[in-house]
Structure formats: C-alpha cells, structure tokens
Amino acid sequence: MSIFTPTNQIRLTNVAVVRMKKGGKRFEIACYKNKVMSWRSGAEKDLDEVLQTNTVFVNVSKGQVAKKDDLSSAFGTEDLTEICKQILAKGELQVSDRERQSQLEQMFRDIATIVAEKCVNPETKRPYTVSLIERAMKDIHFSVKANKSTKQQALEVIKQLQQSIQIQRAHMRLRFVLPARDGKRLKEKLRPLIKTVENEDFDEQLEMVCLIDPGCFRDIDELIRCETKGKGTLERFSTLSEDV
Amino acid sequence: MGHTSLEKIIALQKKTPHIRNLCILAHVDHGKTTLADCLVASNGIISSRLAGKLRYLDSREDEQIRGITMKSSAISLHYTTGNEYLINLIDSPGHVDFSSEVSTAVRLCDGAIVVVDAVEGVCPQTQVVLRQAWLENIRPVLVINKIDRLIVELKLTSQEAYTHLQKILEQVNAVTGSLFTSKVLEERAEKDAEAQSSCTENGSGDQVYDWSAGLEETDDSDLYFSPDRGNVVFASAIDGWGFSIHQFAEMYSQKMGIRSSVLLKTLWGDFYLNAKAKKIMKGAQSKGKKPLFVQLVLDNIWSMYDAVVTRRDKEKVEKMVTSLGLKVMSRDLRHSDPKVLLSAICSQWLPVSQAVLSMVCEKLPSPAEISAERVEKLMSVGARRFDSLPEQTQELKKAFLDCSADETAPVIVFVSKMFAVDSKALPQNKQRPLTQEEIAQRREQARQRHAERQAANQSAETLKGTELNMLPTALSVKTAVEEDNKEHFVAFARVYSGVLRKGQKVFVLGPKYDPSLLPEGCSAADVLPSVPHMACCTVDSLYLLMGRELEELDEVPTGNVLGIGGMEEFILKSATISTSPSCPPFTPLNFEATPIVRVAVEPKHPSEMPKLVRGMRLLNQADPCAEVLIQETGEHVLVTAGEVHLQRCLDDLRERFAKIEISASKPIIPFRETVIRPPKVDMVNEDMGKQQKVAVIHQVKEEQTKYPEGVQVDSTGLVTLTTPNKMATVGVRAIPLPEEVTRLLEDNVELIRTMEQFSLFAWEDKTLDINQKILENIQEFKVKLESNLQGRKWRGAVERIWAFGPRRCGPNILLNSVEGYRRPSVWQCLEREKETEKAEIRDFDNSIASGFQLATLSGPMCEEPLMGVCFSVETWDMKLSAPLAQQDSIDEDSQTAEPNIDNQNESSDTHETNASSASSNRSRSGAEAAGSSVDCYGPFSGQLIAAMKEACRYAFQAKPQRLMAAMYTCEIMATAEVLGRVYAVLSKREGRVLQEEMKEGTDMFIIKAVLPVAESFGFADEIRKRTSGLASPQLVFSHWEVISSDPFWVPTTEEEYLHFGEKADSSNQALKYMNAVRRRKGLYVEEKIVEHAEKQRTLSKNK
C-alpha cells in the first residue's frame, strides 16, 4: 500500500522558459506557455497571466534561484518584477506550438490577400477572392516560411499558381510619349515587353498607350530613360483590374 | 378513358372557346400535385391506382425526395362533357421560396383552382396565391381538399364537419373580400385625388364628402365562393373522390322528386328537410335539425367511410356498391388495406376529375373571353397609362380581345420563364417506340445476320460486309452521347393572338422595350433597324408540354400554353414575342417574394472557375427568381428567395449547369472607416473630462508604443512626419467631414470624375470639352458643398480642395492648407474663361496626392476604404538639393520607401498605387542625367508618397476612429399577431425600427427598419421561421452608418469600471466586426492565443 506523501517542492507545469544572458550570467524566468508572444505584442496586459512566479532563476528546471548580488549587479535593481519584465522583453524563448501555428496561419492569410490583390482572372478580368486563393494554395501544397517576408512569398506563389489555375498579374496601363527620332528605334526594343498596344499615334512624336506586365515596369522605365536621355515621358494609368 | 392521342389535342387546340388554361394554387402541402395527379389519371396517362402517389408532375428528383413541388409544370388534358375541351393545366409550387414560379404560372392562365386543406384552412400562402390571382385578374374556383382527414383523423361527425367547412369557406371569402375592399378603396383614393385636383382648378368651394367609401356601389357578389354557385368542389384527392353539389342535386332530384334547381339553392345553407311535409324548410340550426347538406351528402360519405375503413363491414359494403350500381373488382374487395377498396369505390362513385373538370369548364373563362380590363393591364407597363401608348399599339388590344386564330391576326406570345431540359428529353432525340412493322423488319435483319454469321464460318468474305454495315451505327451512337451533355432551354409561353408556326420570323421584345421608339412601318421580314431590347429570330421548334415530356408541334393557335425551343440566345428570363413590332412588352410579373438570401459561391477546385461562371449564367436564365452577380471583389454572389430555393439552386448548379463541386459561404461584407468629433459623453452617459480617470496600468505603455520614431503628434491631432532621407516634412491633420458633405460627394462621383479628367488634360495643356449641362451641374455641386461647409474651420475650404479620394473620386477630401502654396484648384473647368493668374505647381505635388489616395484606399483599422474624412496638409517643407529636385520622378510605389524588403523588380509592382494618379508619374524633369544619383532610400517621390501615406494614417489614428457599416433598409409586411416576434428578430440582429404603419383596408402592418448588412445573413429565414411565414421581409441596400461604439474602447472611469468591469469583455460590436475583417485578411489581430494561462491542458502532471 502506497501512502501519498506531500512533497515540499512546488512543481511547475506547462513551463515556458525565457532566458537572458546579462553581465556574464544566465538568468531564466518561468512563464506559462503560449503567453509570452501575447505579452510582447501587447495583447496580454496582465503580468500574472504570463509569469508563473516572479522569482528569477539561474536554472528553472533545477529550481536554482538567482542570487541577489548577481541580479543587482546585472540589472542594477533588486525589484524582481522589473527584472522579469526586462527578461520578458529581451530574452530568448522557444516559440510554443500554438504560437507558431497562429503565426503561420496569419502569414498564410496575408500571402493569400496579397495574391488576391495583385492578380486577376484573365477571363473575367476580375480579382479572385481570398478564400479561393487560399484553397488553391492548399491544393498546390504551399508551405509558409516564417523567416521570409509575406510579399516575397506571395510573388512566388503567383508563379506556382499559374500552373494550376488561370491567374494573371493585373496589367498596368502605361502611356509614353517619345520623340520621333527615338521612336522607331525604341519601339522595337519595347515590343517584347509590351503585352498589348491599345492606342498608337505617330506624327511628330510617338504616343502609345499599352498594357504591360507589372514586372516589366522597371525595365521599360530604365530603357526609356536611358535611350531618350530623359526626353521621353512615361506615365502610368491605373491598373486594369480596377477599370473593368 | 384511353390515352388521348397527339392528333386529337392538336385538333382541339384550334377550338379556342373550348380551351381552358388554368393553374392549381395553394399553400404548401394542401394537395395540389395530388389533385393534378387525379386529373392526369383521368386521361389515362398514368394509372388511376397510382394517382396521388406518383406525383407525375414533380419530375425533378429532389421534388420527389422532399415531397414538395419546386417548379411549375404544364400538361395538356382532354375532357369530354357533351363538348370536348382541351385543358392546359399548370401545377405550381406552394412553398414561399418558389412563389416566383407561381407568378409565372398565373400569368399564362385565365383561371385558377385554389386548393384549401379542410383541416388547416386558410394558410399564409393561400392568402398570397389568392392575392396573386386577384392581381392578375384571373378567376379562381375553390377545391376544399382532404375531407377524408376530417373523418379519419379528426373523427368529426358529419354535423361538425359541416360547420367546419362553412368556417373555411368564410375564411376564404374574407380574404377575397379584403382584396376587393382594398382595391375599391384604392380606386376611391385615386378618384378622390383626381377630384380634388380638378376641384382646386375650378376653385369651387362646395365639396360634398362622401363617407360611403364606394363599397356599396360596387357589386362584389360574383367574387365569392359558394357551393350553390357551383364554384366550390369538396374533395379528397388522395382517395380519388370529389363532388360539387350539382351532382348531388341532380341525383336527388330524381330520387326525391324535387326540382334540381330548388335543391341546388337549398343543398348548401341553413335548410332542412321536413320529412312529414316533404318540404324543404329554412332554419335548420335554430330548430336543431340536420341541414340538408349533412343529411343528403355528408352522411352518405360518412357511412361509406364507416363501413369501409372503420368497421370493415363486408356485407354492408357490398350492399352499398350494388345500390350505387358500381362494379368493384374482387381483387380490391379482398385487399387487406381498406384504403384500396375505398378509393376503388369512390373513384367510380364520385370521381374527383369529373367534378373538378366540369366545374372548370363551366365556371372558368376560355382564352377568348379575356376581359378588356386585363388586356389593358397587361399591355401598360409600369406607371404608363394605356391611353399613352402609340396608336398602333392600342389597336393590338382588339387582337387580344378577338383572340382569333386567323392567318392575318398578329401573333402575340408571352414567355413567362425559361426552363432547362436535358437534350435527352427533347422529342428529336427521343427513342420512338417501334411500330409493328419495324419490329418485324428488325427481326428479319437479325435473322439475316444470324444466317450470315453462320455463313461466315464458311467464308470470311461475307463477314467484312457486315462489319462495314456496323460501323456507321457505332458512329451515330457516339455523336448522340456528345449531345447529351448540353442543356436546352425551352420557353414557357402562351399564345395570346394569332398562330405561332415553326420557322416563322418573329420579334422578341425584352421587358424594357418601348414600342413608341419604333420607326414607322417595318415588319418582321425587314432588315432590323437596331432598336434597344428588340431582336428578330426564327421560331426553331414548338412543343406541347406534357409534364416531363415534350411533344413536337408544327403550329400553335391562339389561347394555348406551349414550349418554344431555341430561344436561349434571345430571351433571358421573360419576353414578349410578336410579329408586330408595335406590340408592347407585357407588364413585368408580380413577384411576391424578392430574392434576399445572398451567398457567395465558389468552386471546390479553383481551376474549375470557368465552368462555374457558365453554370451561373445558365442558372440565371433558368430560374425566374434567382439573381447572379459578380461583385467588384471577384465574388460570385447568388441571390435567392429563401433557404429551400437556395438549396435547389445549388443542387442545380452542381448537377445540371456547372457539374462541379461548389461551396457556398457567407458573402464578404464591406466596411468603411471614418473619424468623428470627440464624443462629449462616455459609455455610461457621463460628461467626459469631469470624471476622475482611474489609473489605467497599461494604458501608458500603449500610448508610447503607438507612434514610432520620427512621428510627432501634437495635442490637436497634427501629425508631422519626415521622409527617411530627411529631405521633406509634411504635417497633416484629419478632420471629420459633415455627413451631408459625405453624401454629396458620394452622389456626385461622376461629376468629380469629369473634373479630374479635365484637370488631367489641363495639365498637358490640352482642353477637354465638357458640355454646358455638366458644367452647370458642377457649379451646382460646388455651391452645395460651400453651403454645407460652413463655419470658421472650413473657411475657403472648397476653393482649397486638392484632391478627392480614394480612386480620385471618393468621399474623402485632401485640403491644401499650406501657407503660401497656391495650386490650380480642382474647379478649373469652371474658371476656364476667367483665366486666373497662373498658379504654379510645386514639384512632387502629385506625390502628396498619391499618398493621400493610398491612405484613403485602405485605412489603419482593417484596411477598408475611408469615408467622410478630410486630410488637411498644413505644412510641407522641402530641403532639396538641386540634383534631387530634378531627379526623375517616375514613380516607384510606396514600397520602395521600405528599401530592405523589396529590392527586386517587384518594387515596380503597382497594385497599391492603383489610385496614384497618372499624372503623378510624369517625369517632369526635362534634361536630366540618366541614372542620376538615387539615394539609398529609393527615389524621392516614392519616399514622399510613403511619408504622406503614413502621415495620413497617423493623423487618422490621432482622432476618435469609428467603423461604418453598410445598412439595409428592410421592409417587412406582417400581420398584427406576429408583430412582436418580428421586433424580437430585428432587435436581436441590431436592427432599428424606423416606422410602422397599417396598410389601409387590410390587417397587414408595414414595418420599416434598418439592419446592418453584416447581420443580414440568415435574417430572412429566421424571420420566416419565427413568424410561421406570416411576415416577409425585403432588403435593399440604403446607406453607410457609423457604428457608435469605439472599437478601441476600454473602460477608464470609475463608473465604466462599475458598469463594464475591468476588461470590458461585454461584446463591442465595432471591435467584433473589425477583428473579423482583420482575421479574414490575415492582418494582426490583438488577441491572446490562450485566454487563461492556468486553464491550459497540463501536459505532464505527475512527475
């Protein structure tokens, strides 16, 4: 028959450890899981909901409490709550499962929103909805990388999506006026960059309204600026998706 | 009766006076389709044994499964009583969601059979259909159905049943009566209005007020239902019996020797038979005698049920059968289910089809008897009076009235709906039953083949020959399979005049066609001048509608209901077809239910988008009440009349039109963001400022983190921001615009756009010609703006307007309050003549405007557009070095200002600068060294745009921010008893009642309310459920409304702490909406991942 003997240890469960090295010493505090990120983003305002105890440790799992001298020499104060706040703000921690999950989910949505904003269905010339893009992204098994910017990933996704659904970057409408001298020469160079020419007028100077892929804008801009030595002008109308 | 042949029906179609076009109308589950079954069975199309169980006219699979009718379908029947009649019967659905189908059916008919359940009595839909029949001016007859339920289920005595039936009849007549009175009152009001106007013209003082309301003058006796008038039939369609009192009157006049005319009058009503005196006396009720109807009619039926169903008395049954002179098959007599025997007896004794059809033929008008009133109503669209139509058109009225099938008569056909048919069902593609000869022929062929095969064993050469023969047949099979997948549309129509022939050239007139626009003298044969809403086509094929089957016809004479094939190119939903172009389009159908349930539809697999789009287009054509929209956001929105209707539409899309997996979801709800004046009172209605602020622990921290470095905000809300390269500084303040100004800006989007265009051209030293009228409008708009922007704060504001936004024409204003900067005003087009001193434009003027456009396109709260905000640029300092000023300002977008993120070519990505004006991107530097020094923060104009955008956002945030919700105005018709429940539903969904008034002459209330669009999902369904269908809402988008609660509100004062608690976790409507949008867009939502740290699952408990 086993007898239940109360231990004189307080055992902490669900611990997330936040560590910080300061003044050559390592300090740790014991926090609840899934809470530190909320604190850092400002969503959680109650410190007691974040900290298990406001003791500062040297090693949480062994239960070694930091010495007062060390604390005051490293932080310049003996106020434990203040020290805990500092460690919370600047220390390193292991991101817990749900924190990571919600972060990735949020990024996934963000990417889908960016894609939906930038692209149109070439048939209807209307944008796709975000939920449809999300589904398409799941279909091609796109996985979010947490350390890359969402915009960068969105541009990659668009390329991948083009293989599975009919999607297209919204066209940009440009108008440029070129001096007649350069007009002919430049037109040939511009030709491969232009999707469709809507309007062309060639008397004293070449005036053109055309649709281009947004990716080519830099090239065209560069080309016109260099070749005409600043005489050609380029202006941008709104993108197509909005006109239709 | 045998199967009526097609030839017979074709022959009958030509005798217009012997045609009856009628539809069956009733509340859901009152037995329309069962009754139709009985009528169909009388023509031998289905077995009479199956009548009532088969539901022949419910040809869709889901109709059979759910047991409700969902579409109206027609069938032509043949009936003989002395004369031969052709009856075009249309069965209609009873469910509210499909009341559009009822409208399409009613339009094509001259009469209607209104079915009422003997137990349930008058139900909401019964009232609706009676009203519909009334509005279309068609004559109804009444069938009181399910009398067997009174006997078997309710176990009423015959006497009780009689009073019950009387009550029902009274209810029905009450509805008709109220329709009649409201019409009379309406006419009266009109007449009064006319009289009054003429009175005032004459100036005569002596007006005579007539209080009689005109009800006495108008005779309404022929409107009501009464058995002695012969327009009521008592029936039990499921058991196959039905009678009108005519039948009994005749029966008893022989038996009792009383004249049938006397019996007819006395059989229904308070009369009794005095057995001693052999006389019929009045006052059965007061003397406690059985009324004649009970004694002679109901008692017989009751004893029949008693003998057959309740007691199963075989001997008595046999006695009854012989006394009635019927023959019942012994198989039925021995059957264990008494219902079989019962229907076998009753359907011979009192066949329901006989009773109903004879009543229909006698009481309902033939197509030739169309009333002049109805014709005028059909021909005059909207508010236009008949007299105002062109003369040629008025002449057509005669054609309507004549209803002649002459060659010379103009053809007038009305198409009320389009319905989709599988190409398999079309007669052209149908396999015909083989005739005897063909069978013999085939047998012969098979024999030959067999012989050949035997011969082939001996010689291989013969085999080759047969193979060649087989090949073409295989090919033809293949093509047939390919065709199968196509949906065909058949127009559900009726000929009102003339003869419609296959191959005839006709005009198809859309609902918006106006005959008065037509040039003189042209006919169908001419080459068409292009007239809006008119098309010319050839009639491809004509069909006789026989329920689910179609029979091909060559011509259809006047007065008949028919199907027209091959019209899908020309007709969207409904149309008028005529050989005379002066024919007016018929008045649009009266839809009782407008589509209000909105869902967004998406394919399960995104690659199937084109299929969905095509499917939606087909659905739109096939369903008179479904609407399909593609929204600006790219959503495909389907609007239906109700949940059941929605389900059907989705099924149709899945299985017929698109043939793909789809998912339907709540549509995206738009919001707007705005700022308001600082509120004077706090959440508990205490004066602001006087309250002692409770120290809020974390508030301070928040305030500090709100603005990053480089942004200064002063106490009045002026935000100053410097570009990353420290070259320019802008100071912006956000000011709420008065509500009237916002509305004015919204209403004049087109004008603003024109003005924009003008300044754009002026920029390039060109001029755009604007006509005088528009100029006047602009002037008026300007004056109105000035009158609405009064006060010290707005002095000279209108002149100083820099731009409108977003998209350069939105309801937000950019104001130029920079000292010493005069730029050309947006009102340039008005001042063309004046030629004011040329105001110079600063460099990068457009960067500021673009920044403003970007900021207004997506606000800081949840990236939704702004509305009703004025950004006033108060300072704008530039410290430019010479080369920078000349730097080519071809715009890079705002992202370039954040150089680390995107250094690839994506920075040229423009999406966010959509709105940036074309001119903003003009390079204005003439001679400039190519590839001039680009500083490390990217091109300067881009930086300025970003800085301006950020400044606007912070300025916005410095003011009290609010969310604006789109609002529906909601009109609800409800009866008095469900008023309370309507209010409950409205208040639960944050609706607000504006007014409530009683409709004159009825007991209906009309409630006007506003309801946030965000709360409207499922609203219609809920309100119908809660009020048992007695209230029907209609939703129309009306306006944007500021949600009064602050999304960022937290309690600060003592009182608020007391009232809401420290966390204020009682629901904040604005916060709820805002977070929902942010979550949808993948923006950061300030929300804890777990609410309570201690309540997480403990992973390792016992260590």
Image (spheres, grey):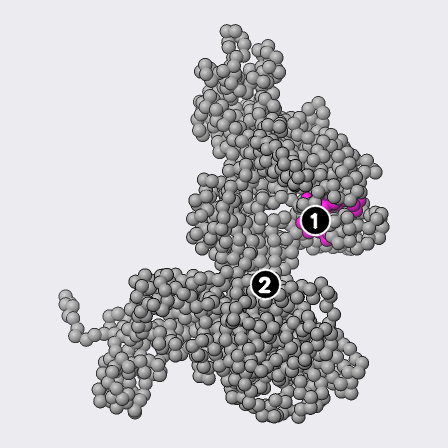
Query: Which chain does the residue under circle 1 lie in?
Result: B
Which is more toward the observer, A10 or B479?
A10
Q: Looking at this rendering, what residue extends furthest in the top direction? A: B277
Q: Which residue is mark 1?
A: B511
Percent from the top left, x then y, of residue B765?
A: 72, 79
Amino acid found under the numbered disc labelled 2 = Leu
At which x and y percent is residue A181? 78, 87
Magenta residues? B565-587
Label 1 is placed on what type of residue?
A: Pro
Q: Nearer the viewer, residue B145 or B793?
A: B793
Pick whichever of labels 1 and 2 is earlier in the sequence. 1
- In screen coordinates, is B1091 left or right of B174? left
Q: Is residue A173 magenta?
A: no
Residue drawn at (64%, 50%) of the image: B622
Q: Quadrant of residue B19?
A: top right
Locate the N terminus of chain A by quadrant. bottom left
Q: Residue at x 17, y 73 (%)?
A: A7
Name the foreground residue: B286 vs B875: B875
Q: Which residue is mark 2?
A: B744
* Residue displayed at 59% across by 31% down: B210
Dot 1: element: loop
Q: Secondary structure at mark 2?
A: helix
**What chain is tagged by disc 2?**
B
Q: Are the residues under marks 1 and 2 on the same chain?
A: yes
Res. B48 image quadrant: top right
**In the rendered structure, are the residues bearing label 1 and label 2 in contact, judged by CB atoms less than 8 Å apart?**
no
Side of B424 relative to B32 (left or right) = right
In the image, residue B525 sits, relative to residue B364, either above or below, namely below
